[in-house]
Structure formats: C-alpha cells, structure tokens
C-alpha cells in the first residue's frame, strides 16, 4: 500500500498507464533480442532437417527436365517421417530407392542404394547416431535395423560423391563445383561431368546471370545467361594406367581382342608365366569380377552399365552407327538384317529360304558366321538394323548393334527357353535393343530326323534336364539344327519392320 501511495503522489493515473505499456513493450523487446541472439541454439536437432540435393533457395534457378518435383516432395516427407516419427518401413519406401537424399547441414549425400532400399531408415539414422547427432534412445533402435557393411557402403558414397552446387543469395546467384568441367563458350553452357552424378541431379540445369545485382532487372537483362548442367559419364577406373599380366596366354585370343586390350591399357601385355623377374606395383587385382547375370552390369555396384560398356566397345572399334534406321513412308533406303549362320550346330538348314523371305519383305540381307576378325565383324554388326540367330554364344555380338536395333532370337526345341531369356533376352533390354523371340516347334527341329517320336529326347526333355547340364547340352545344343518354317516366321519379321517404323 505504501508503494501505491508513493506512485499515486508522483504520477497521475494517465501517466501510470503509459508507464505500464512502456514496461510491457520493453519486455517484448528484451525477449525478441534474446531469441535473436540464441536462435541457433533453440532449433531442433539440425540433422533431422533433411533436404534433397537442392534447397528451397534454388526454386528460381533450378530447371527440372524430368518433371520429378512431386517425387522430390514425397521423398522428403517419407524420409523425415522415418527419422523423426520412427515410423515402420512401409510400401512407400519403394519411392526412396534409387533417389539420393541431401543433408544440407553437412553438404553430404546419403544414397539409399543399400540392400535395395529396404534398410534406408536404419542406415541413415545410424550414421547420424555415430556422428553424435541423435539421441541415445535412437541409437539403441538403430543398432537393430542396420548392418556394418551397409554403413561402410553409405560412407563410401558420402566420401566419393561430388555434386554441383549452386547458391541463391539476396543479391546474386552463383555456382561453385569441382571435377571434370567442360565449358562450351558459344552455347553458354558449363557441363559438370561425373560418373557418380545422382539420378536426381542428372538432367537438371541451373541458369545463372553472372552479375551481383540480381534485384536490378534492367542491369541483369544486359547480362548473358549461362547454364550449369550435371552430366553423367562413364569414366574408366584406370584410364589406361594399368598393366595386364597374362597367365595361360593364348596367342589367338590376344590377337582376336587386341583392340579392346589396347584401349584398356597403355602398356604391353606381360606373359607372366614366362617371366622370372620380380615386378613392383602400387596395387594389384588378381582374378576377374563378374556380375551374376549374363551380359549384364549392375550400375549401382560398379558405377558402369551395359550402355557404358557398349559405348566403350564403340570407341574401341571406331563404330560409326549410333542408332538403327527409322523407316519413313516413301523412303528408299532399306533396313539391313544380319542372319547369323553357324556351321557346326544349331545352324539354319534352309537359310536361302529365310534370305528370300526377308528380302521380299523389304530387308537388305547379309548372312554370315562370326569369325576371328573381331574388328571387321563388329563393323558389319554395327552397320545393321536387325540381327537374328539361333540361341548360342554367337549372339553376344549384339553388343555391337546400334541403339534401338531389332534382335530376334530363335529358340531351339527342348526346354531352352530359360537359357534364351536369361542369357540374351533380358540383357538385350539393358542395351536399348528391341527384343523378339521365336520358339521353334518340333517339326522345325532336325531331332525328329535322328530319333523316333516316342524317344525320351523327343517326349521328355525335362527328364534330360534333370540328368545334368552335360546330358542336356549334348542333345539339344550340340545335335540340333533348325529348318525354319518361313510361313510361321514371317509375322516375326513383320513385327521387326513395325518396330523400325516407330
């Protein structure tokens, strides 16, 4: 009461109100100042704020050529949910597979390419825990959901990946990147070449006017616009700086593939079996790596694809034809068909009839067997728009065909379908070829000329398969030729022509 009396004597009631309002505003200013000063320390755990490789500030710069903005938003939501809310892995996780997630705070790329995207949650969270950016409770959960090989794979990707980085600030836009850079002056393009450019960043470009007065529309209109584009290229691991030490050397094999060997290495081959010296190298690889699928390469594991391998072969043999012909109405030029013939087994016994049929439909036809002159034969295959042959090793020459060419595999009798599909059918799709398959009937096989119709080889091919590979091969691969029913085969060639019209 005494304080009220003193205040009452010193100030009028109106002045007391003004004093109260002033104190309230002052408190607000003090609180605002505290929030401003300690703002960085009041935010939630920063690492849970995951973004994709381009932040919000790039909306004015980024041009997405693949219309994937909705997909980006979905991935952001999914991954944030997984890490923050600890939700269980759902079918939505499929959307995360193959798309890289960017940690804006550390500028690192975390790639969910581990175990086909099944353990992304555990892998990403464990990295955060190990680097001291998540709670101990989270660590206990994560340790159950991820494995050390996955962590090693993710950390390897984080260490090796370098993405182009473009920044938008208040008065300027700029890009800063490192690596294999190609500047094409006349087109105002800067290309960032990388074998590890993500599928998300690939096909994206950033438009930059290199002048630091972004808000001045008149000044910026007088500045030439440049584009920075991420481009994925297949870089060779050793780039020729490797020497091959050959064991069990076969001169014919070296001669047959010398163009490829010369492209791979800048040094002479060493016949190590005949060398008694001691040779010192900084590193060595003994043996060959092989993907479990035939004629295939896993690009997620090796950073190479079958397309990259075909481009390498094209360069090795100086092959000129990149794409197969596209037939137009009134066009005089005929598509070229190569019929792979064989002399010993699985050969066409009526190849003349097949050639006549193909020519009558409008093909220019070449019939020949693959020979030891790889350089010459690669040129012939590359010059063709379609190739056909009976299942066998000779069909590996499809690697020389141009893009969008037609590949027709003739499948022999006797349960060879699985081999045909997995050895050549599926791999051909990774090579950007149009695959057609023609399965012969028993009447088109020469086996009926060798065995009676009630023979086990004719009636029960499955029983021969169960007897083992050697028994199966000796009958259905080594003793069988094909007399193609040209009337029945005609629709397959017509389909090939239809595909060349598209």
Image: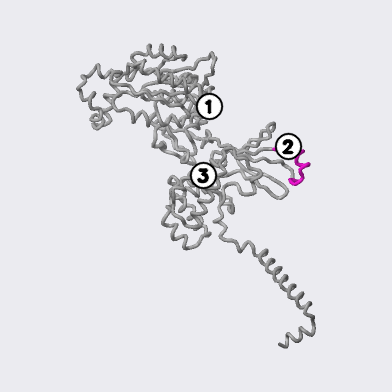
Count up the numbered dots. 3
Q: Residue at x 49, y 41 (%)?
A: 282
User: Which numbered dot is residue 224?
Assistant: 2
Question: Residue 389 sits in which quadrant?
Answer: top left
Q: Residue at x 35, y 13 (%)?
A: 350
Q: The N terminus lies in which quarter of the figure?
A: bottom right
For disc 2, the neighbor class at 10 Å (few under 14, some 14 to 19, many from 20) is few
Q: Main secondary structure of the magenta part?
A: loop
Query: Label 2 vs label 3: CA separation?
Result: 33 Å
Q: Residue at x 52, y 53 (%)?
A: 80
Residues in magenta, as a range:
212-225
Looking at the rendered structure, the secondary structure element under dot 1 is helix
Q: Is residue 82 above or below residue 373?
A: below
Q: Is 66 contained in the magenta span?
A: no
**Between tags 3 and 1, which lies in front?**
3
Q: Position of residue 337 (x, y in %)?
A: 45, 17
Mark 2 touching mark 3, by CB under 8 A? Answer: no
Task: Compare residues 442 and 179 and report the one nearer the observer.
Answer: 442
Q: Is residue 42 above or below residue 161?
A: below
Earlier residue among tags 2 and 3: 3
* Relative horizontal placement of residue 440, taking residue 110 as reference (left or right): left
Query: Label 3 vs label 1: CA separation?
Result: 31 Å
Identify the residue under disc 3.
99
Q: Position of residue 217 (x, y in %)?
A: 76, 43
Q: Is residue 140 above or below residue 13?
A: above
Q: Position of residue 415 (x, y in %)?
A: 29, 28
Q: Is residue 232 above or below residue 95?
A: above
User: Which numbered dot is residue 315?
Assistant: 1
Looking at the rendered structure, the secondary structure element under dot 2 is loop
- Asked whether the viewer can see residue 158, the reply is no
* Relative horizontal placement of residue 20, taking residue 282 as reference (left or right): right
């Amino acid at each position: 009461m005494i304080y009220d009396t003193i205040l009452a004597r010193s100030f009028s009631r109106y002045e007391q109100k003004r004093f109260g309002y002033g104190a309230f505003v002052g408190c607000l200013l003090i609180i605002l100042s505290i929030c401003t000063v300690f703002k960085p320390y009041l935010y939630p755990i920063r690492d849970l704020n995951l973004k994709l490789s381009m932040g919000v500030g790039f909306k004015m710069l980024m041009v997405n050529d693949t219309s994937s903005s909705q997909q980006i938003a979905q991935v952001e939501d999914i991954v944030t949910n997984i890490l923050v809310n600890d939700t269980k892995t759902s079918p939505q996780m499929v959307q995360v597979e193959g798309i890289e997630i960017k940690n804006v705070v550390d500028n690192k790329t975390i790639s969910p390419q581990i175990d086909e995207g099944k353990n992304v949650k555990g892998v990403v969270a464990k990295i955060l825990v190990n680097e001291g950016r998540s709670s101990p409770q989270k660590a206990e959960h994560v340790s159950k959901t991820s494995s050390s090989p996955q962590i090693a794979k993710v950390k390897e990707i984080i260490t090796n990946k370098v993405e182009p980085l473009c920044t938008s600030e208040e008065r300027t836009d700029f890009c800063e990147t490192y690596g294999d850079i190609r500047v094409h002056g006349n087109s105002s393009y800067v290309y960032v070449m990388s074998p590890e450019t993500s599928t998300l960043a690939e096909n994206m470009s950033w438009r930059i006017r290199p002048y630091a007065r972004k808000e001045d529309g008149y000044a910026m209109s007088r500045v030439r616009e440049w584009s920075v584009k991420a481009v994925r290229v297949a870089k060779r691991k050793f780039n020729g700086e490797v020497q091959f030490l050959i064991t069990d050397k076969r001169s014919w094999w070296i001669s047959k593939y010398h163009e490829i060997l010369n492209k791979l290495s800048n040094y002479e081959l060493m016949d190590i079996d005949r060398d008694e010296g001691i040779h010192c190298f900084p590193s060595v690889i003994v043996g060959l790596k092989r993907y479990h699928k035939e004629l295939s390469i896993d690009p997620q594991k090796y950073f190479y694809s079958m397309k990259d391998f075909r481009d390498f072969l094209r360069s090795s043999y100086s092959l000129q034809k990149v794409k197969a012909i596209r037939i137009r109405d009134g066009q005089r030029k005929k598509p070229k068909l190569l019929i792979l013939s064989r002399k010993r087994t699985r050969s066409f016994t009526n190849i003349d009839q097949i050639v006549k049929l193909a020519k009558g439909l409008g093909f220019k036809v070449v019939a020949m067997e693959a020979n030891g002159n790889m350089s010459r034969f690669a040129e012939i295959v590359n010059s063709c728009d379609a190739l056909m042959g009976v299942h066998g090793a000779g069909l590996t020459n499809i690697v020389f065909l141009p893009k969008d060419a037609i590949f027709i595999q003739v499948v022999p009798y006797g349960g060879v379908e699985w081999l045909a599909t997995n050895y050549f059918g599926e791999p051909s799709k990774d090579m950007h070829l149009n695959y057609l398959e023609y399965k012969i009937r028993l009447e088109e096989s020469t086996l009926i000329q060798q065995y009676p119709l009630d023979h086990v080889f004719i009636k029960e091919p499955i029983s021969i398969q169960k007897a083992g590979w050697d028994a199966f091969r000796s009958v259905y691969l080594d003793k069988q030729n094909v007399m193609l029913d040209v009337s029945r085969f005609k629709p397959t060639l017509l389909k090939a022509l239809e595909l060349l019209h598209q």
